[in-house]
Image (spheres, rainbow, N blue to C red):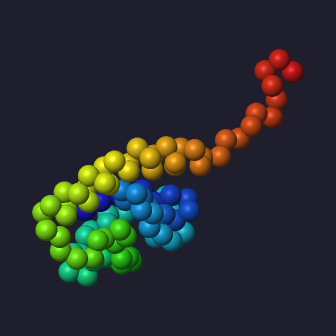
Amino acid sequence: MYLRHVGRDGCVDVDLATYYIGPQMAGRTVLLQVVAESRQFAIWHQDQVVKRLPIKGLVGQEMILDDYLKYILQEALAVPRRSSARRSRKIRQPALWDEGA
């Protein structure tokens, strides 16, 4: 289960994936429950499921241990690259006035 705050854009992030919940949930806290049988998240708000979404990034098949270890090693090595790519995509607002002006 993942407890997340829904952003102004109606989205939440889980690991490296973004999930669109909807603008009606913006500013609220939701619980994402893993429903393994259907490979989905059940999105809970208060005492009811408000949406179901497929889980992103699943491999889609059973893996033998050696393949799994190689896979998670690749993912772990990719994290720093993904983090730096996300930081470099952030838009920086230039200052309207310089300090000495």
Whether residue 64 is visible, yes or no, is yes
Q: Which of 25 and 69 is in front in this view?
A: 69
30 lies left or right of 67: right
Residue 72: image location, x then y, percent: 25, 56
Query: In the rendered image of this protein, does residue 45 appear above or below residue 69?
Result: below
Q: Quadrant of the N terminus?
A: bottom left
* Res 5 → quadrant: bottom left
**Residue with the most extreme right position:** 101
* Res 59 → quadrant: bottom left
Residue 61: image location, x then y, percent: 22, 77
Residue 48: image location, x then y, percent: 32, 75
Q: Quadrant of the C terminus?
A: top right
Residue 69: image location, x then y, percent: 19, 57
Q: Which of 47 and 20 is in front in this view?
A: 20
63 lies left or right of 101: left
Query: In the rendered image of this protein, does residue 95 appear above or below residue 45?
Result: above
**Residue with the most extreme top position:** 100
Residue at image x 40%, y 57%?
A: 16
Residue at image x 81%, y 34%?
A: 96
Residue at image x 34%, y 48%?
A: 77
Residue at image x 45%, y 50%?
A: 82
* Res 71 → quadrant: bottom left
93 lies left or right of 38: right
Query: In the rendered image of this protein, does residue 98 appear above or below residue 54?
Result: above
Q: How many numbered badges does the structure rendering display?
A: 0
**Residue with the most extreme left position:** 65
Whether residue 25 is visible, yes or no, is no
